[in-house]
Image: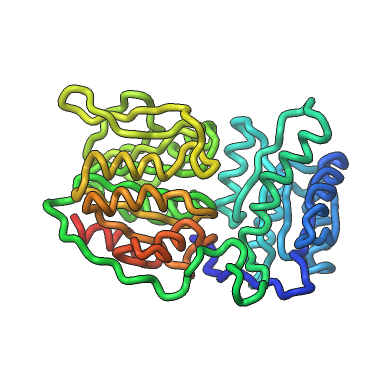
Amino acid sequence: MSRLIYKKTISPGNRIRVLIVDDSVVIRRLVAQALSEDPALEIVGAVSNGALGLAKIAQTNPDVVTLDVEMPEMDGIEMLRRLRPENVRPRVVMFSTLTERGAAATLDALALGADDYVTKTANGGSLDRSLASLRDELIPKVKQFFSLSQPASATPTGRPAAAGSPRPVIQRSTAGLAKVLAIGVSTGGPTALGLIVPQVPADFPIPILIVQHMPALFTRLLAERLQASTPLKVEEAAEGTVVTAGKILIARGDFHMRLRKNGKDLVIGLDQLPPENSCRPAVDVLFRSVGETYGSAAIGVILTGMGQDGLRGTQVLKAAGGFMIAQDEASSVVWGMPGSVVAAGLADSVVPLENVVPEVLKRI
């Protein structure tokens, strides 16, 4: 299970301390240059392998480590193994490649306690393009774990607005038994799914549809790994896959997942319409489709993740009479997605990760 840790607050005048661990001198320089452009970030070191990284952590006490997977002497996976026993350790964002090997290594790293990952851009791009990609992808992922102190009138960075006591929700009684479970998750998702999927009983009577923010290679490997933990059938969804009871379907990376009718069957529809919330697949797309298709027979679950993907889809699902469960802050790696649903007063139940499946079973 992911570490239970609240978002660290960075006081005014202080910055988020970042250590870069990568065997490529070019990557180290690019990452340092991109991150240094943000005034909230401070580079405290850049080293070429995991052994040097461990020593540098002891010297500099960074808040975040950006960590390459393949390095000489000690690679990123072994460095993570040696970090794991520490009581207090930095957040870790992996650098991985969009290859089968890179995707598998990234999932290994997430299982060992890495908090998130960024995929390396293909070689051959211009310096400006590489820097822009790092700024757009890496900086938000580094900052997502922290609250930057601001004046009282401002909303803290990375936290959902009005994230104090959730507004009360007018409960709607469902008209019948639940017929589908839809799950949306992002940062921390593979670990969260690795905990809850094995809890689902073998005779689970309804289909499970999952959107996890990941590229295509990653979602296929994630489905294969989850399959090893459950007797239920787990698949990366394909166009036309029939939605049946007891099957877990994971949205394919880079494709939105919807539901459509095909004769008497409900089947999966995949498309590459524009991203929503900068995401494809988007949780909003799935939740809207589930709400419109199943109405009050739908259960939605929103788990750990950065941003607000799932909020608008939850509004549709709730308006149709569906039931919404949100992961609580203490068990979330990042309480952005579930926090936005809670702050909007749309969560019927807010529970720790380990209580999500028992809460679902109450509704079936």
User: Residue 121, image x and y in percent?
Assistant: 71, 34
Who's the residue at 34% across and 52% down the image? 315
Residue drawn at x 19%, y 61% as measured from the top left: 172
Give the residue displayed 68% in from the left and 67% down from the top. Answer: 89
**Residue 353 is at least partly visible in this image:** no
Counting every numbered tag in the picture gives 0
In the picture as drawn, the residue positioned furthest to the left comes out as 176
Of 227 and 33, nearer the camera is 33
Q: Which of 252 and 235 is in front in this view?
A: 252
Q: Position of residue 83 (x, y in %)?
A: 68, 62
Vertical placement of residue 102 versus 86, above or below: above
Q: Judge from the rendering whether residue 144 lies leftward or rightward of residue 135; answer left or right.
A: left
Relative to residue 25, is residue 213 drawn left or right?
Answer: left
Residue 340 is left or right of residue 179, and the answer is right
Residue 316 visible in this rendered orientation of the protein: yes
Q: Where is residue 232 in the image (x, y as percent from the top left)?
A: 30, 42
Determine the image quadrant of residue 207: top left
- Counting from the top left corner in percent of width and height, residue 74 is at 77, 49
Between 161 and 253, the residue placed more toward the observer is 161
Residue at the limit of the structure toward the front, as seen here? 153
Q: In this view, does 280 lie to the left or right of 74?
A: left
